[in-house]
Amino acid sequence: MCRSHPIEAAAIATLFGSLLACVAPAALAAPVVHNDESLASDRPEAWAMTWVAASTFFTAFGSTPSLDRGRFAAAAELGAVPRLSADDQRVGFDGVKQEDLNRSPVFGRLRVMAGIGDGWVAEIAWTPPLEIDRAKPRDLFAAAIGRRVLDRGGATLSLRAFGQHGEAEGDITCPARLAEVNDPVRNPYGCRAASDDRIALDYYGVDAVAGWSAVGWIWHVDVAAVRTELAVDVDALTFDVRDRSRLTSRSIVPWIAAGASRALDARWRIGVEALYVPLDVRRGVGAARRYDPFATARVQLRYRFD
């Protein structure tokens, strides 16, 4: 009978141990679930997605500026993001689970406008990826093209097409503060770690902006129709299961915005605006539809390069 050499036995043991180290993590990995859904526009999850997108809607903030070809203007704007009540945040699983939606109190972007000839003005906007309370935008860009179709006696009418592409991320379905909390009252869905959830904030639409001069201000009303193409990608470890569900929502929603701007000097202009987005929601299976709109106020500071 052959006797194993000590060196060979040690080598085999080392190899066997290495194989176990590689196989064990895979064997112990949490099972993954994909509960993908395309949601009706009045489902609570879809309402929350549209509510978040509404905070980013690319309003005209006044009539299309009069810019000759090759002339530019730049602007920075900031809008309030309203806080939701505990009941309003109960949107997960068709209105059962409370999601942590109250993160950034503001939304902002930077804009550049350029005259491209024959009265047409092109715009591009970008939201800086600033993290607030573990949530931040990612590659969030908006663009528009428009022109004045009426400019007579201090009254204007502008038409514009616009769109946005990009996303935001955060630990929404499983906030970091609940990770490994063993209290079933505080952590009823068994969050084991901070989730890495992402929402695609894509939309496009058209709007019409009426403007007029009065008492030293330029006033405007902006009416739009927006096609939203929203999606949430969940990445959450709950109990011993990793949730990688994808929820999508497609709808057409209107907005109305109204505000005014005033010249500070030959180049600087400040403006304020209120935005209103009508939204409906059914909070729970079989529940009656409820009117629950989005409303906010914004401010913009614009500089014209002459």
Image (tube, rainbow, N blue to C red):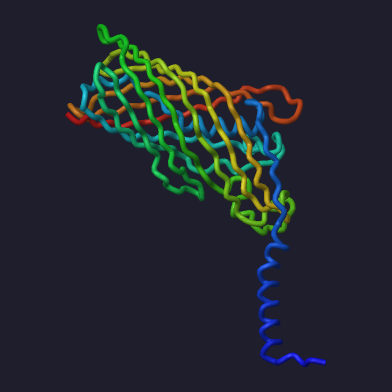
Give the vertical position of 72 relative to 26 (above or below).
above
Q: Residue 189 in the image: x percent, y percent? A: 72, 49
Q: Is residue 219 left or right of residue 39?
A: left
Residue reaching furthest to the right: 1
Give the vertical position of 93 relative to 253 (above or below).
below
Residue 159 lies in what quarter of the image?
top left
Give the vertical position of 190 relative to 294 (above or below).
below
Q: Residue 192 in the image: x percent, y percent? A: 67, 56
Q: Tell me the residue at 35%/23% (across/down).
A: 145
Q: Nearer the viewer, residue 162 or 181?
A: 162
Query: Number of callouts in the render?
Result: 0
The quadrant of the image that shows the N terminus is bottom right
Residue reaching furthest to the top: 153
Q: Tell me the residue at 21%/27% (across/down).
A: 71
Q: Is residue 155 left or right of residue 49?
A: left
The quadrant of the image that shows the C terminus is top left
Residue 94 lies in what quarter of the image?
top right
Residue 91 lies in what quarter of the image?
top right
Q: Residue 153 in the image: x percent, y percent? A: 25, 7
Q: Tell me the residue at 56%/30% (across/down).
A: 50
Q: Residue 196 in the image: x percent, y percent? A: 57, 50
Q: Nearer the viewer, residue 3 or 192?
A: 3
Q: Is residue 278 left or right of residue 10?
A: left
